[in-house]
Image (cartoon, coloured by chain):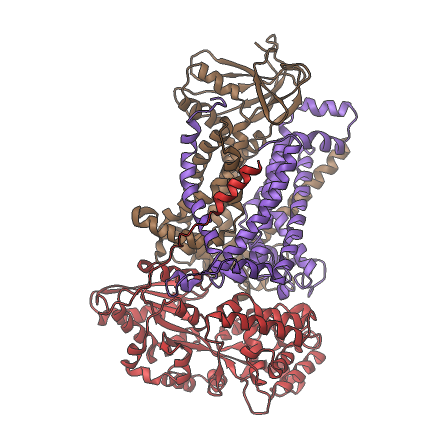
Chain colours: A purple, B brown, C red
């Protein structure tokens, strides 16, 4: 099997193409279609005729000042979560390579346990831990009555912590495994040349792990930008006066919960385009540095 | 150095405890008697554990049935999406064809759409499919399997791509030289080597299928027997109703199967995720001074090379595969990074001569892929 | 690369003139469908539904005894997922049940989706149908068509702690203004207590204040509505229920506060009795109607409740009608009160219950004084889902906006949703 032009990739790709073509491309095409229609439950069940509204769903969305506020909050929140997840994950991955066996086993098992917890369960548990009166954390620090969700930033901070808690294990395990795969001789050579931990990390590990990092970064961006469950559960649907809304929750609130599929489709398309733009910029940067898809 | 290490050990243990604490709290709250949960004096232990909360949750009709449904869906999705993703990943890494990048980016785009936006088109699609194929229409577990497979595929393909490309092409080539057909190469050489990667991917697929509420409540309308576990437990997820004991018991019950799955695949997971990193090291293979890329995969361990063979110590990659005629152990012995490329041994047939594999991939610039036999190893 | 990306995007977003799938509008079976077989019934699931299930089992036994060769397949639907289940049943006739329980605020949405059958003929042919009050009928009528039979009501009244009141020498408030002064007096004397538990997300607790002042949801920026909203949000303050604790409370959380003894008063429903009795407030509370603006008046309460309806896609509408009238009849309404504390909608049943249990009196009085309802418009679902009212209350309660600003903003959103 070599990189030659044959028909082989066709039959290898066929199952994926059938499943994805049918269950992804077709619905995505429908998504684009719905976004230019007035399409609610009444239209779905045939109670009212479908109406073509052109760009109305989009103009309504783009002229909605709340949408821009939410978009800004989402971008900043997602960026913070991605950076925090990468920093924590990478830091702990390096830590894992430098500790004894038992602590390493404990940390990796703990991380996998956090990874395994379903988002609903995890969010609810953290919510209980940080409950104003009944929460263990408040009682531990003697700040009973302190409401973490009252202030916009503490609320985002708490939700962000849960997001990082749930997503750092993937980064940590992936990078740890990647670091372990680096030949010891390379690291030894670096040490002989007098490189410290910091320099070794940035100048040796990061370049070597770039392909892994690429996936980790892209996936983190996609996941954190679309964060829903944690916000929905912990801030009870967007926080005080909607101060903790993110785009996905906003889309749900504004469109899907009240079956306004046309409007929801428009939000979906806009979200997709934003994510696509971010990812393309990142992929280009990768290409410039010599990686390729 | 020793003291430093001990400090790091302590730090690691502390972080582990902090990480696992919410889970401990979840289980603890589930077994605390009602009075202690509502207490303004929470203690991180309980002296009177009670299973009341679990009893309340398990009183859900047909709990076992829902658990089984969820497990079946998740495991089938893991198997099918892993298999399809493997084939697609091979196509995307072992072959160059037009629109390869397009296909890849499409897989990324597919993950960017908010799923809620797709439910209505999918609803009608599934309804219509159900009219033709009875097992996968509305109200069936088949519908859930189908849709989850589709939703886990893009990520699975993206992940697996890395694993497959980390396996040296020379392995396939050597096996083909040895007379193995394309199918044999796929199943007997590549598949076992990618297995740890599949384990890593399966974790994501399992979690995705297991945690789903959206499709379960969209597609399973009237068939109570085909309900999934999260749906049945949803009635307890009401922080408003203040039954924290039941909420925590339901949470614990939802978490346990995923935890078990994690424990089962844990070893392969770490091995798998590690295998996907390709390693750039300057070598003197081929044209002097050019940067060369060595790729190896599998579980890596240091093992001294056989003396007198000219192969110095290096990581060993092991692929374990299915039993049968072609039971094999692919042993790669990358030579010293300073001198050579990849060397390895494939033993495809029991009792047959092991095939020696040697080669390295040279790369000059992002676009050009020149492959040269590595002259350093014979 | 650029070209390929464009191709990928185009692939994903191709838009042609092809229409999306929809369901064809269905028509009700005119002959009433088969009289035998399995009748499919959807009822709401509740965390402790044991007593409800027992009553339903009894009704099913009675029904199957009277209807040979029938079975009743009852499914309990989680309230959180009702929306998807109902939509699914509207869109896929084969999955549709026959009889359904649904929340009366969901009526307009289901009605515009064309999912519910007209019950006009069923109710007029049902002897007990005449006992339905005009108000109850109106709450199940959409654009002139009766689409459900009100099964039970839930209304809210003022719970207060008798021990705290007697200790401080207080009387239950007779007006909303007195409610505020009483609440502040309690908080001043017992700083560990909240005077009255109120919450920013507790819309149905806030609306009586607006209605009592003469305002309404459809004119939330009128002077009367603003006065009512101000009266409510003034309670979310340090001297009663500090914003830190109360600004984001839901109705359920105020129940928790009252039940656990952290609040001296609470605006709770008749359906919250069991929760309160499970807490430390048990045996130390009494209930009066929530007072209005003038002494002796009662603030209009929100008439929440559930209806029983028949799906338009039902396969056995005639059998469904028989089961529905059995379940909605006096006998089982009274049994449902005993089991779940649900207030009957039929006059004879509610009289029977009131005679039996003095606890219901303030709630019956509240209903008697006139209840109000949310706008019967599919736009309401949108207003509710996008949290227009909680956002408005929370903005005022946290000082992010003044009453005028917040109500103006909310009024725009409400108008937009209702006129679409």
Left or right: residue B134 versus residue A257 is left
Q: Is residue B47 visible?
A: no
Report whether residue A24 is seen.
Answer: yes
Image position, residue A159 (x, y; %)? 63, 55
Residue at the spot x=68%, y=31% of the render? A207
Q: Is residue C157 or residue B107 the one in the foreground?
A: B107
Q: Report the label total.
A: 0
Q: Is residue B195 above or below residue C416?
A: above
Q: Residue at x 34, y 76 (%)?
A: C328
- Residue drawn at point x = 64 percent, y = 81 percent: C231
Which quadrant of the view contains residue B28?
Answer: bottom right
Rendering coords of residue C387 (x, y %): 56, 67
Residue that sits furthest to the left in the current view = C68
Quarter of the image where one finds residue A99: top right
Q: Is residue B331 above or below residue B43?
A: above
Lateral position of residue C63 relative to residue C355, left or right = left
**Nearest the camera: B169 or B335?**
B169
Quadrant holding the C terminus of chain A: top right
Instruction: State the residue at coordinates (56%, 62%).
Output: A60
Residue sitting nearer the eye, C17 or C155: C17
Question: Picture coordinates of residue C311 (x, y %)?
Answer: 33, 67
Task: Farthest residue to the top: give it.
Answer: B308
Q: Nearer the viewer, residue A254 or B221?
A: A254
Residue A242 on image: x %, y %? 62, 63
């Amino acid at each position: 099997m070599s990189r030659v032009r044959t028909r082989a990739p066709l039959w290898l790709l066929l199952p994926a193409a059938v499943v994805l073509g049918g269950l992804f491309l077709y619905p995505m095409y429908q998504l684009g279609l719905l976004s230019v229609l007035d399409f609610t439950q009444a239209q779905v069940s045939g109670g009212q005729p479908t109406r073509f509204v052109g760009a109305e769903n989009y103009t309504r969305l783009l002229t909605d000042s709340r949408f821009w506020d939410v978009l800004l909050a989402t971008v900043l929140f997602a960026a913070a979560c991605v950076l925090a997840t990468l920093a924590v994950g990478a830091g702990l991955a390096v830590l894992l390579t430098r500790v004894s066996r038992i602590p390493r086993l404990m940390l990796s098992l703990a991380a996998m346990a956090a990874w395994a917890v379903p988002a609903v369960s995890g969010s609810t548990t953290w919510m209980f831990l940080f409950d104003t009166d009944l929460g263990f954390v408040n009682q531990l620090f003697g700040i009973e009555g302190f409401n973490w969700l009252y202030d916009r930033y503490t609320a985002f901070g708490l939700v962000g912590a849960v997001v990082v808690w749930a997503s750092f294990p993937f980064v940590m395990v992936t990078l740890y495994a990647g670091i372990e795969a680096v030949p010891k001789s390379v690291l030894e050579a670096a040490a002989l040349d007098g490189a410290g931990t910091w320099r070794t990390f940035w100048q040796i590990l990061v370049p070597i792990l770039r392909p892994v990092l690429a996936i980790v970064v892209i996936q983190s961006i996609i996941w954190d930008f679309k964060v829903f469950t944690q916000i929905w559960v912990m801030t009870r649907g967007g926080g005080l006066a909607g101060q903790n809304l993110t785009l996905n929750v906003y889309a749900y609130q504004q469109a899907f919960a009240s079956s306004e599929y046309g409007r929801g489709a428009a939000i979906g398309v806009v979200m997709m385009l934003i994510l696509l733009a971010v990812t393309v910029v990142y992929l280009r940067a990768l290409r410039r540095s010599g990686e390729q898809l | 150095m020793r003291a430093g290490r001990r400090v790091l050990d302590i730090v690691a243990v502390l972080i582990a405890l902090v990480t696992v604490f919410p889970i401990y709290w979840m289980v603890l709250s589930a077994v605390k008697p009602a009075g202690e949960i509502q207490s303004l004096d929470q203690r991180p232990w309980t002296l009177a554990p009670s299973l009341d909360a679990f009893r309340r949750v398990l009183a859900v009709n047909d709990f076992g049935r829902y658990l089984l449904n969820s497990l079946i869906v998740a495991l089938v999705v893991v198997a099918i999406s892993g298999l399809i993703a493997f084939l697609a990943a091979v196509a995307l890494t072992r072959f160059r064809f037009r629109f390869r990048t397009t296909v890849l980016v499409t897989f990324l785009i597919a993950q960017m759409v908010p799923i809620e936006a797709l439910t209505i088109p999918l609803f009608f699609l599934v309804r219509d499919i159900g009219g033709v194929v009875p097992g996968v229409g509305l109200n069936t577990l088949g519908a859930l399997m189908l849709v989850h497979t589709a939703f886990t595929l893009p990520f699975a393909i993206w992940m697996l791509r890395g694993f497959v490309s980390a396996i040296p092409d020379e392995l396939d080539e050597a096996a083909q030289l040895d007379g193995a057909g394309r199918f044999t190469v796929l199943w007997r050489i590549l598949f076992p080597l990618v297995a740890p990667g599949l384990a890593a991917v399966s974790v994501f697929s399992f979690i995705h299928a297991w945690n789903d509420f959206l499709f379960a409540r969209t597609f399973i309308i009237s068939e109570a027997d085909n309900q999934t576990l999260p749906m049945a437990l949803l009635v307890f997820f009401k922080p408003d109703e203040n039954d924290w004991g039941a909420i925590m018991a339901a949470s614990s019950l939802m978490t346990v199967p995923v935890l078990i799955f994690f424990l089962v695949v844990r070893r392969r997971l770490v091995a798998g995720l590690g295998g996907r990193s390709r390693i750039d090291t300057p070598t003197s293979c081929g044209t002097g001074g050019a940067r060369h890329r060595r790729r190896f995969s599998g579980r890596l361990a240091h093992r001294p090379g056989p003396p007198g063979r000219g192969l110095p110590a290096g990581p060993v990659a092991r692929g374990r595969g299915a039993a049968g005629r072609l039971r094999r152990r692919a042993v790669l012995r990358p030579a010293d990074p300073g001198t050579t490329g990849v060397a390895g041994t494939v033993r495809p047939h029991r009792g047959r001569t092991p095939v020696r594999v040697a080669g390295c991939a040279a790369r000059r610039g992002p676009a050009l892929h020149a492959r040269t036999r590595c002259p350093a190893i014979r | 690369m650029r070209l390929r990306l464009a191709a990928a995007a185009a692939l994903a977003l191709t838009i042609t003139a092809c229409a999306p799938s929809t369901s064809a509008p269905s028509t009700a079976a005119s002959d009433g469908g088969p009289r035998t077989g399995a009748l499919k019934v959807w009822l709401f699931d509740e965390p402790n539904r044991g007593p409800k299930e027992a009553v339903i089992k009894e009704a099913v036994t009675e029904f199957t005894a009277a209807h040979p060769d029938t079975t009743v397949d009852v499914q309990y639907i989680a309230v959180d997922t009702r929306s998807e289940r109902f939509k699914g049943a509207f869109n896929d006739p084969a999955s549709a049940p026959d009889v359904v329980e649904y929340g009366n605020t969901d009526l307009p949405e289901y009605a515009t989706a064309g999912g519910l059958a007209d019950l006009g003929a069923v109710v007029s042919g049902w002897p007990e149908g005449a006992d339905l009050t005009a108000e109850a009928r109106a709450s199940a009528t959409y654009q002139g068509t009766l689409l459900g039979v009100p099964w039970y009501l839930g209304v809210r009244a003022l719970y207060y702690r008798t021990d705290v009141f007697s200790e401080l020498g207080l009387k239950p408030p007779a007006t909303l203004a007195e409610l505020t002064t009483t609440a502040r007096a309690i908080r001043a004397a017992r700083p560990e207590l909240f005077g009255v538990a109120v919450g920013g997300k507790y819309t149905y607790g806030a609306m009586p204040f607006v209605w009592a002042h003469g305002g309404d949801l459809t004119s939330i920026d009128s002077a009367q509505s603003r006065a009512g909203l101000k009266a409510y949000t003034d309670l979310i303050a340090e001297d009663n229920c500090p914003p830190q604790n109360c600004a984001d409370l839901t109705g359920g959380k105020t129940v928790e506060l009252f039940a656990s003894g952290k609040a001296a008063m609470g605006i709770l429903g008749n359906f919250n009795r069991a929760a309160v009795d499970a807490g430390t407030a048990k045996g130390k509370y009494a209930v009066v109607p929530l007072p209005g603006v003038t002494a002796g008046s009662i603030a209009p309460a929100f008439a929440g409740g559930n209806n029983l309806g028949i799906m338009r896609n039902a396969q056995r509408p005639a059998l469904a009608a028989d089961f529905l009238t059995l379940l909605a009849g006096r006998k089982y309404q009274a049994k449902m009160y005993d089991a779940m504390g649900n207030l009957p909608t039929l006059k004879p049943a509610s009289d029977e219950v009131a005679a039996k249990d003095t606890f219901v009196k303030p709630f019956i009085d509240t209903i008697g004084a006139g209840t109000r309802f949310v706008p019967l418009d599919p736009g309401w679902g949108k207003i509710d889902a996008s949290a227009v009212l909680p956002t408005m209350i929370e903005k005022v309660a946290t000082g992010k906006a003044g009453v005028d600003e917040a109500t103006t903003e909310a009024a725009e959103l409400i108008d937009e949703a209702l006129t679409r």
